[in-house]
Amino acid sequence: MGPARQIGGSSPKRIEGPDGQNLQLHFRSRLSLPLFTGGKVEGEQGAAIHIVLVDVSTGHVVTSGAEASAKLDVVVLEGDFNNEADEGWTQEEFESHVVKEREGKRPLLTGDLQVTLKEGVGSLGDLTFTDNSSWIRSRKFRLGLRVASGYGEGTRIREAKTEAFTVKDHRGELYKKHYPPAQDDDVWRLEKIGKDGSFHKRLNNNGIFKVEDFLRLAVKDPQKLRNILGSGMSNKMWEALLDHAKTCVLSGKLYVYYPDISRNVGAVFNNIYELNGLISEDQYYTANSLSDEQK
């Protein structure tokens, strides 16, 4: 073996190759979940997905030799393949769990389906799932890596696998609620407001298109807002809707209203018309410090 460098993490289980080498491919990054059809497969927080070739007996990355420059195939595996993380598997077991596309469908995984290691390290390229995972037994997939045909002959390099994950249809993403909602989100991103449903249409017909519009009326005239939504919305739904809306992070903009030209006293409001405080004779008083009479 050539020179190696130490990496963190626990060593995978020892695999004896025919020449005594103990090599395994390993994913060094976790996937960003959930995954949707048509969406890019990425690491957590949008990072690249890194892979390494490890000498299992030492935990070091193999940085030289033919194996350190091997070409790898990216494949999709059954989600229930080898549930025990420390359990070994044979090449035949790995191959028997590779998932192909459904009949009549496009290839299940598209994009850069091969990776070439450089000094034992590589990164996945652009990858996209074209189908969801609901149709297979476990209802989940894994990504797998194996040495491409013609590389690493005579040496058993154990394949890599990711954690099991669900792939959902992209249309689920299109209708997803946001936690927390943004003030410029469409109002149907709030709980209990279905996209193009009756509540959504009622709000739109009354000029409420964004979460910010909803919050402004909730502060200014909550009863009017409740009436717009009508009797089809139960009190429990109304409370859940308000609770979700109130988690919205506001812009931080403040507005001062002076009731007369002297500008001796000004009321300070945030962007959804909540009273933040009072300016009086160049002094600022928070809303909490004001008496009911002052408010």
Image (tube, rainbow, N blue to C red):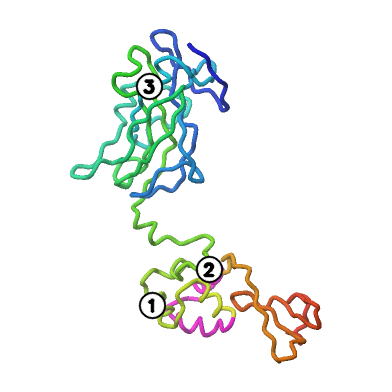
Residue placed under numbered mark 3 in the picture: 70
For mark 1, give the secondary structure.
Answer: helix
Instruction: Tell me if mark 1 has few (under 14), some (14-19) or many (20+) residues whose alpha carbon lies within 10 angstroms of its own.
Output: some
In the image, which is nearer the foreground, mark 1 or mark 3? 3
Q: CA distance from mark 1 to mark 3?
A: 57 Å
First in residue order: circle 2 vs circle 1: 2
Circle nearer the N terminus (2, 3):
3
- Residue 295 percent across, percent down from the top left: 73, 84
- x and y, in percent, of residue 106 in the image: 23, 44
Per the picture, the main secondary structure of the magenta-coloured stretch is helix
Crowding near the residue tagged with mark 3, few <14, some 14–19, many ≥20 C-alpha atoms within 10 Å: many
Classify mark 2: residues with Cα within 10 Å, few (<14), some (14-19) or many (20+).
many
In the rendered image, the vertical position of residue 70 relative to residue 284, given as above or below: above
Determine if the magenta segment contains residue 118.
no
- Residue 228 painted magenta: yes
Q: Which residue is mark 2?
A: 183
Look at label 2 and name its amino acid. Answer: Gln
Give the residue displayed 63% in from the left and 71% down from the top.
253
Name above or below for residue 244 compared with residue 2: below
In the image, what residue occupies the spot 54% across and 80% down?
Answer: 217
**Which three-letter amino acid code belongs to the residue tagged 3?**
Ala
Image point (68%, 80%), residue name = 256
Q: Of tags 2 and 1, which is closer to the observer?
A: 2
**Residue 201, which numbered label?**
1
Left or right: where 253 falls relative to 99: right
Amino acid at the residue labelled 1? Lys
| Among the two numbered marks 1 and 3 on one chain, the one whose residue lies closer to the N terminus | 3
- Comparing 256 with 245, the one in front is 256
Q: Magenta residues, as a range? A: 220-244
